[in-house]
Amino acid sequence: MSAAPNYSYTPAQVTAAFTEITATLFTGITAEATPKMLVVAGLQGSGKTYLLEKNLLPSNRYANYVRLYLPDYRKKHPQYAEMITLGVLHAYEHTEAFVREVSAKIFAEAFTRKYNIIMECAFDSIDFAAFPPKATAAGYQFETHIVACNQEFAHASSIKRALKSLEKQEMERFVMVSMLDASMSNAQAIILAFETAAKEVSGSQITLYERGLGALKERTLRAQSTYTKAADGTLTISGTTALYTYSAYGKIIDNHIYTMSDRDEMIKECHLALLKTQTYAEHADSMTIRTPIPPTSGH
């Protein structure tokens, strides 16, 4: 991780960035009788942003939603022009606190206005577990999409994503194993909070996908539940596939890499990543690339 230069900013500069972003972000957005929360959740590298941008948003069902975060929001940092001269990884790292404050202000304003909101959740903060009850108390209906994968896949995938960002000069970061460990620890409490929220407001949904090696790289739908609450409080759970349960998520994340074909594929992916780091050695010197598979006897 690079040394920490003095990239200070003031509350007034956070407010200025918020004002500039929301001048267009909130244009045409209207409150609905039942405000909605679209949540896309999963470990870093699981493919949640890809799901959002390539599948959900193109459906045109979310035009009247406010998206809390985009990489371009980072460019509003008052020292961004200076940071970017040292590379996209450096700029990403040193705009993190600023963009979190800006996004928090966007959320607070959108929530107050009861606008529909798009939220991405990487389980990187246990604070996410406290949020759903506040949203349902305000009448929010949840549509939650969870992309499940094991930690080994997430680790390799996040490295590939960061190397790709260096190739294309896009804002991204390398996710350390310790960050994934923390997210894995937070996941259960956060997901259960989303499940509880879905049962509070009628019409809420949870959809579970699996990603992994081989055919699972393309993401597979595993379960989906719609929660309907009657006037007397009776809850009905329905779906056209297997119904969602947390145990289904747990089974996926605990399904480690054991087969020879998966082990060989993972080793190949890691070796290719190591080769690419030679091109970006000065930018990737702080990352940790390991072969994220458990050892077995005789191999």
Image (tube, grey):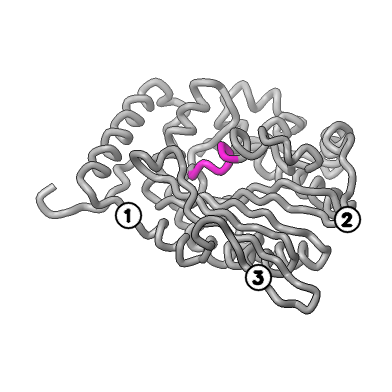
Disc 1 versus disc 2: nearer the observer: 2
Mark identifier at residue 256: 1
**61, 22: nearer the viewer:** 61
Q: Residues within 10 Å of mark 1 (few under 14, many from 20)?
A: some
Horizontal placement of 11 versus 130: left or right? Answer: right
Q: Which residue is mark 3?
A: 236
Q: Residues within 10 Å of mark 2 (few under 14, many from 20)?
A: few
Q: Earlier in the sequence, mark 3 or mark 1?
A: 3
Q: Residue at x 59, y 38 (%)?
A: 93
Q: Residue at x 86, y 38 (%)?
A: 26
Disc 3 versus disc 1: nearer the observer: 3
Q: Is residue 34 magenta?
A: no
Horizontal placement of 10 versus 271: left or right? Answer: right
- Is label 2 in a helix, a strand or a loop? loop
Q: Amino acid at mark 1?
A: His
Q: Is residue 103 above or below residue 129?
A: above
Determine the CA span between mark 1 and mark 2: 44 Å
Name the spot of residue 139 as percent of width and height, x first.
82, 63
Mark identifier at residue 244: none
Q: Is residue 159 above or below residue 165?
A: below
Disc 3 versus disc 2: nearer the observer: 3
Determine the CA span between mark 3 and mark 2: 22 Å
Q: Which residue is mark 2?
A: 33
Dominant secondary structure (helix, strand or loop) of the stretch shown in magenta: helix
**144, 96: nearer the viewer:** 144
- Is label 1 in a helix, a strand or a loop? loop
Q: Earlier in the sequence, mark 1 or mark 2?
A: 2
Q: Amino acid at mark 2?
A: Ala
Q: Residues within 10 Å of mark 3 (few under 14, many from 20)?
A: few
Name the spot of residue 61 as percent of width and height, x first.
73, 40
Segment colored magenta: 46-51
